[in-house]
Image (tube, rainbow, N blue to C red):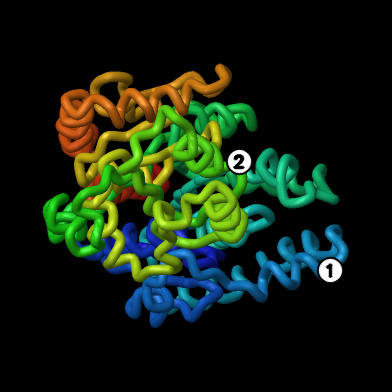
Amino acid sequence: MKILYHHRTASKDGQAVHIEEMIEAMRVLGHQVRVVSPVGGEAASEQGHGGGRMGADMGWVHRLKERLPKALYELMELAYSWIAYRKLLAAAREFQPDVIYERYNLYLLSGAMLKRKLKIPFLLEVNAPLVFERSQHSGGLSLRGLAKWAERRAWRSADFVLPVTNVLAEHVAAYDVPAERIQVIPNGINKAHFAIAPAAAQAKADLGLSDKLVLGFTGFVRDWHGVDRVINWMASAAAPRHVHLLMVGDGPERAALEAQASRLGLSERVRFTGVVHRDEVPSYVAAFDIALQPAVVPYASPLKLMEYLALGKAVIAPNSPNLREVLTDGTNAWLFDASEPLKFEAGLSSLCNDAELRHKLEAGALATIDRLELTWLSNAKRVVALAQRSAVADAPI
């Protein structure tokens, strides 16, 4: 098929991984993909969307958002749909795609507009209910009614809406999107990317951590992730003295966590790598003994979780419905009740003191990827199958 792939994402984080891996997987399957985006289009996709430095971000976007009145910024987001639509229309007329595939963003209606203009099947990937999310965070929404209209318009225009969890699918269904047009496709991993990771012992040796029990976290760390609880626990009598915290990535909470570790006399036992190239991530995760997911957005499909599972790590995570779509307590993860104080810390203590349990969870984690087909290639196959169904349904009789 010829797939016209559109997104509005400029950041260098898990979003970029999702975009790049899906495009590559579609191409591996033999399909042609033309990319339209705000960061250089096809060239950016071919070159790794900016070099693969995970955790780097397009700061100018955030600075613009901070300086403009909120309502004006939101109107500019909506206006961008027209700019992107003109780019999409020009690309479609030249490329003659069989399907439009768009990564949803708030106020982004370009794909829906192109579907209406050219009558091309339209698939919409949804990673978050952004009206809800932005109403709760980032200072809220100024034009909430307009935002809800735009979200409903985008979701209802799609031939298929592709949320990443069943929990998120419920948000989509609340906009009266028919159930038969909602298909859950969670995040995945590239097995080849993680197959080159070193064995755990070698990974630890490379980092000078051979004698340590390594707790690990990957990604862009924020205050709600709860990593401060890990550091407080490390300072308690319950934590073994040889426990080391390895933070792979960066984020706005880094300085506060480093200061906390210093106050508690743990600076030598807490290490931040800073921003690393995505190709280096498996080498760091391979060194983890316990992989941390201290908190989670209730509708998300965390990319870090897939990476932990791919390398067979003992995972500790909240016992939330979205994570239970992938994790089973005692089989491939230790799940704790986030509503009960100190359950997370108790879980850390149990895992640190029970090597046999860790090995059991490691085996369960490693088997999960194949059992649930949590790969980008499997996701691309499902997307293409849905696109082909849409193309047949929209074909003239």
Report the quarter where the C terminus lies.
Answer: top left
Residue 186 higher or lower than 91, as above or below? above
* Mark drawn on residue 353: none
Please say if 315 is above or below 151: above
Q: Can the viewer see residue 306?
A: no
Q: Name the residue located 22 percent from the left edge and 52 percent from the top edge.
A: 286
Q: Badge 1 is on which residue?
A: 68
**Who is closer to the viewer here, 391 or 83?**
83
Q: Residue at x 75, y 42 (%)?
A: 135
Residue 313 point in image, percent of width and height = 24, 40
Q: Residue type at mark 1?
A: Leu
Q: Mark 1, residues whose alpha carbon is within 10 Å: few (<14), some, or many (≥20)?
A: few
Q: Quadrant of residue 64?
A: bottom right
- SS of the residue under disc 2: loop
Label 2: how many Cα within 10 Å (few below 14, some 14–19, many 20+): many
Image position of 91 (left or right of 224)? left
Q: Nearer the viewer, mark 2 or mark 1?
A: 1
Q: Which residue is mark 2?
A: 129
Q: Residue at x 34, y 35 (%)?
A: 240
Residue 341: x and y in percent read: 57, 20
Q: CA distance from mark 2 to mark 1?
A: 23 Å
Amino acid at the residue labelled 2: Pro
Whether residue 55 is visible to the viewer of this picture, yes or no, is yes
